[in-house]
Image (cartoon, rainbow, N blue to C red):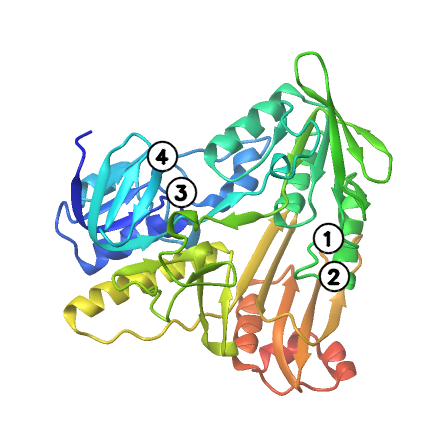
Amino acid sequence: MASGKHFKYIVLGGGVSGGYAAREFAKQGVQPGELAIISKEAVAPYERPALSKAYLFPQNPARLPGFHVCVGSGGERLLPEWYSEKGIELILSTEIVKADLASKTLTSAAGATFTYDTLLIATGSSVIKLSDFGTQGADSNNILYLREIDDADNLYAAIQAKKGGKAVVVGGGYIGLELSAVLKMNDLDVTMVFPEPWCMPRLFTAEIAAFYESYYTNKGVKILKGTIAVGFDADANGDVTAVKLKDGSVLDADIVVVGVGGRPLTNLFKGQVAEEKGGIKTDAFFETSVPGVYAVGDVATFPMKIYNDERRVEHVDHSRKSAEQAVKAIKGKEAGSAVEEYDYLPYFYSRSFDLSWQFYGDNVGDAILFGDTDPGSAKPKFGSYWVKDGKCVGAFLEGGSPDENAAIAKLARAQPPAASPDELKAAGLQFASKI
């Protein structure tokens, strides 16, 4: 590849944000050769959430090109050919190791340089590894992580190779819960281990978590709380055989899957842009402290207008929307036309087994649980409202219909005055549907 390529726009990162940015650039209008997407992955941008769900299903697993962006939000599927047709250069399997914002130059591991007029940082997160903490034996074979499609391929291969074997899942967040379910669906013996008093502690209350933990237990997933993995045993081939826990117990393991969080990939820009709350500080248009440099998705700390504070959000919905907003702002600035400020309502969701939940708003204040929280019910359906300073600021719903999910979103956006806890509990979903 010739060194020293120049582009009017470079999107650094070929994940969800990178793909949605490409679509928005095409929609707004770019000339052939103006835009490059640089990705360290070998494939065109795809909907990352599929990796912890349908990609690992025992029957008819999802495969590319099925889940390239933008199918996850009901949009068109952008195949590699789409980029060529639009004159967008998709530069794959290319890791950028140096970014010099002053000279507007990116340098790849292979020594190629790319210069730009406008840069969109969409580098996302890297997965936190136990080897980062020096955990004993953490480099053994079959201790797996999930972030990119290569990771999912490794996990899928391990599942096939260890059918009927024992899997230990380290971590009780999104990845832990989704992968425990999918491993169980693949007929593995599954044990979840996490240090917190209940699963998904950043979002779930103890009552919400109790439902999911009971549901998983009923499905045959074993859950060990309040302890962590402190080491691993391996056989002569270097394959993991056991997980040693802090409480002294030892779990046999053929596969270990670790989901203990991610870190925003901002290292390339350290000391070159303003940072805040672990991310790159941006305005409501995702422009950083360096003019012409924008940051979106996991790496951006942006003004959350609805709560009048600054936040960093790690979720696919924000990855999509922030990318679109930044491109609108870039093109708007060129055209001299006004673009509305980003006004994001936090939204999280997850699916596992036959369950599906959505959450909107802010989980602060007092949580009020409503509905049927019996994990043995044929179709459990329950939710929670969060009430702060007399207003309903957040809402969670398991088993909701599209209309009901839309109602709790509307409620979280409106922040209506809340009834008394007893009235809210009794009204349940009716309270949201009246907004």
Judging depth in this view, the residue of 96 and 159 nearest the camera is 96
Q: Earlier in the sequence, mark 1 or mark 4?
A: 4
Whichever of labels 3 and 1 marks the residue nearer the N terminus, that label is 3
What whole-number distance in Å separates the C-alpha atoms at marks 3 and 1?
A: 28 Å
Marks 4 and 3 close (CB-CB < 8 Å): yes
Horizontal arrangement in the rendering, residue 187 relative to residue 45 (left or right)? right
Quadrant in the picture for residue 180: top right
Q: Is residue 244 left or right of residue 1?
A: right
Q: Secondary structure at mark 4?
A: loop
Q: Nearer the viewer, mark 3 or mark 1?
A: 1
Quarter residue 25 falls in: bottom left
Q: Counting residues from the N terminus, which is met first, the one under dot 2 or under dot 3?
A: 3
Q: Which residue is mark 3?
A: 46
Q: In terms of sequence position, does the residue under pointer 2 or pointer 4 come before the other?
A: 4
**Residue for badge 2:** 208
The residue drawn where x is 32% and y is 75% is: 340
Most extreme residue toward the top, as rendered?
A: 236
Q: Which residue is mark 4?
A: 43
Quarter of the C terminus within the rendering: bottom right
> Three-letter amino acid code at disc 4?
Val
Spatial distance from mark 1 to mark 4, Cα to Cα?
33 Å
**Looking at the image, is mark 2 or mark 1 earlier in the sequence?**
1
What count of labels does the image hold?
Answer: 4
Amino acid found under the numbered disc labelled 1 = Cys
Residue 116 position (above or below residue 134): below
Which residue lies under the disc numbered 1?
199
Which residue type does callout 2 highlight?
A: Ile
Q: Which mark is residue 371?
A: none
**Marks 2/1: CA–CA distance:** 9 Å
